[in-house]
Amino acid sequence: MNTFNISDATSLSIEDQVEIITGYNGHYTAVGKHSTRNNFMLTFIRMIIQCIVLIPMLLLSSFSANAWEYSEEMDKMRGEVAKYATTESKDKVLFGGFTLLRIFLGIGQSGSNDSFAYIKLGGAMGAFNCISTCVLDIKFDNDPITQIYVRSSDNLNILHITSPEIFIDKIKHSKKLIIEAKFISSGTHQLEFNVQKLKW
């Protein structure tokens, strides 16, 4: 069994690490090399580092690939099924000084194949600053700014897009959409939506 001074411990490489047991007078005794144990620890550390690097990338990839959520709703009276696809804005709107409003973009198709598209506030609070019909500035990807006409719901929490077919067709060929809208008590806000990979 070999002995060495504590000052010599810094010269050991990772591969030559040894289990140390405290001895006498500031000296330590090396109790054999454990290469199998060291290899396991090195592999374990590498796995942790890979997870730290890969998990955020996977989450980002998942967000990009699954921006849309799909659902169906049965019209029991007519025996028709309406289809929906929705995505949430990455931007929130502060309402009343303390409430963050979630904003959703939705498209759909009724059982009679009529298309529709809308912008909706999440929750019961907040309201769009739009009475009856309004014009909104929008921008797809790096295209020039264009306008769309919308009609507000009675409680001002939904804006229905008046030309949904053209709007949906443009979404199919785009990755990002920015909508500029006005909100009561909150002013004007730009809302960015991830619209890529729409399955429609």
Image: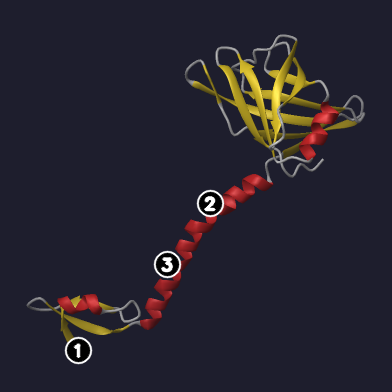
Q: Which mark is residue 42?
A: none
Q: Which mark is residue 45?
A: 3
The quarter of the image holding the C terminus is top right
Residue depicted at x 56% and y 53% = 57
Separation of marks 3 and 1 at Cα, in angstroms: 29 Å
Query: How packed is label 3: few (under 14 Cα within 10 Å), some, or many (20 or more)?
Result: few
Which of the two labelled residues, at mark 3 and mark 1, occupies the earlier sequence position? 1
| Position of residue 154 measured from the top left corner of the image (x, y, whole percent) | 73, 10
Give me the C-alpha separation between circle 1 and circle 2: 47 Å
Residue 64 position in % (x across, y down): 65, 46
Judge by depth and name the residue closer to the eye, 189 or 185: 189
Percent x, y of residue 110: 87, 29
Residue 141 at what x, y percent from top left? Answer: 69, 37
In 3D space, how far apart are the residues under numbered discs 3 and 2 (Cα atoms)? Answer: 18 Å
Q: Residue at x 76, y 18 (%)?
A: 150
Q: Secondary structure at mark 3?
A: helix
Of callouts 3 and 2, the N-terminal one: 3
Q: Nearer the viewer, mark 1 or mark 2?
A: 2
Hey, what amino acid is under mark 1?
A: Asn
Q: Which residue is mark 1?
A: 2
Q: Residues within 10 Å of mark 2 (few under 14, many from 20)?
A: few
Q: Residue 44 lies in what quarter of the image?
A: bottom left
User: Residue at the spot x=65%, y=15% of the render?
Assistant: 128
Q: Using the image, determine if residue 50 lies above or below residue 1.
A: above
Disc 2 target residue: 56
Q: Is residue 179 left or right of residue 101?
A: right
Q: Amino acid at mark 2?
A: Pro
Q: Viewed as shown, does residue 98 lie left or right of 167?
A: left
